[in-house]
Amino acid sequence: MFLAWISRIFSQIVTVSWFNLRNVKERIGASAAAVVGVAGVVLVFIGVLSIAVGFRNTMASTGDPEDVIVMRSGATAEMMSGLSHEDTRIIADGPGVVRNAQGPVASAELFVIVDVPKRSIGTVANVPLRGVSQAGVDVRGGFELVEGRMFESGRNEVIVGEGALAEFAGLEVGSENRWGDNIWTVVGIFTTGGTVEESEIWCDAKVLQPAYRRGNSYQSVHLRLESADAFTTFKDALTTDPRLNVMVERKAEWYASQSGLLSTLIIALGVVIGVLMGFGAVFGALNTMYTAISARTREIATLRALGFGAFPVVVSVLVESLLLATLGGVVGAAVAYLSFNGMHAATLNWESFSQVTFAFAVTTPLMVGGLIYALMMGFVGGFFPAIRAARMPVASALREL
């Protein structure tokens, strides 16, 4: 008996829903408006969140498990750190550090901020100028020169990351810029596989020191360990050494932590914008479904008089609303992917007060999230009209026949 009742209800739902969907073409204008409204919300929602995802991916992709960064204890950014030459020598001689013919694969580095104009709007931006040691390339596995040559030790020469070249003006090979007390010549362009270091300009640390009157000091040591398992031994050796006052972090984890504040703010902004725009889309869906029900008053009354229950009517209205929302969600997600995925931009990293170039990332989870949000808007937009349709007095509606 129960199965027969379920079968009858399901049959009614299918019949009424199919009947409703066949008549969508008669109200194509209102339906299209609802689809466009939902698509617009999903487009903006995914577009804003893709900024946070792309920025976080860029920061988190910097460094392998064997790559380590060492700074002064308590430093929240490389700019806030300070290490003496003796400190860097002790760090480089730590247990587990990879060694080659030139010695430990460890680069004592400086990090300063220089003013470079943006290409798009012409304003001046804070761009990192990093002084690296001889092993600076060896500690970065993804490094590759794509144009020009490497800077020569002892000369006022720099190489520029692809990300920085794309976003900032005056960094082409052969161009000259005055930073600090020196005039620097760009001699090469490099890539590091899409990491945050492509936002930087590199030079010889020994030349950068006098240009900014840093004496023989550094701010960090970037190094490579023999294996990821050597990290704990290396960290314990340095943090317990009475000659040092340092913090030791895996490079990937350090840069990922640097993205936290900005990512959180962007995600919060995206949610707020999405919710506010979602209200507009819900009202559009409500208007569409109420209009559809008003146009089908006699049809619904006739179905009810023929024995169709209130529940199948409710479900049929919700099915129509959810299908329109799904279509809008799919359109919005597709347009977001085609418009934003891979698009390059630069933003200020508030942890280091310097510009970071990154690519928007419209990921599968982000598109799925946008589609779920579209379905939520469709459900809310169809629920109240569905209840109204189910409660419609059959006798009153039939008088309109």
Image (tube, grey):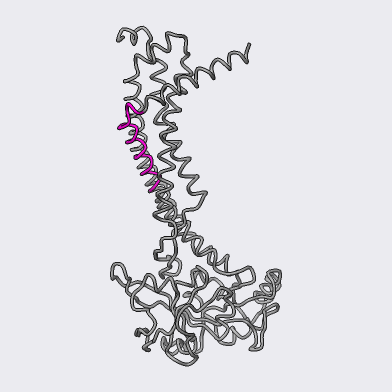
Relative to 57, residue 87 above or below:
below
Near-viewer residue (36 or 124): 36
Relative to 231, residue 90 above or below:
below
- Residue 232 is situated, as x and y percent measured from the top left of the image, at 69, 69
Q: Residue 87: say if magenta.
A: no
Please report the residue visible at 52 percent of the width from the left and 69 percent of the height from the top. Answer: 193
Where residue 17 sits, quadrant-wise, is top left
Q: What is the count of numbered marks?
A: 0
Where residue 134 sits, quadrant-wise, is bottom right
Relative to 142, residue 366 above or below:
above
Where residue 185 sits, quadrant-wise, is bottom left
- Residue 242 is situated, as x and y percent measured from the top left of the image, at 65, 80
Q: Residue 37: say if magenta.
A: yes
Magenta span covers which residues? 25-43
Name of the residue lying farthest toward the left? 122
Looking at the magenta stretch, what is its main secondary structure?
Answer: helix
Please report the residue visible at 43 percent of the width from the left and 49 percent of the height from the top. Answer: 46
**On-image quarter of the C terminus:** top left
**On-image quarter of the N terminus:** top right
Please report the residue visible at 33 percent of the width from the left and 8 percent of the height from the top. Answer: 396
- Residue 223 is situated, as x and y percent measured from the top left of the image, at 61, 77
Near-viewer residue (172 or 183): 172
154 vs 65, left or right, is left
Relative to 6, residue 187 above or below:
below
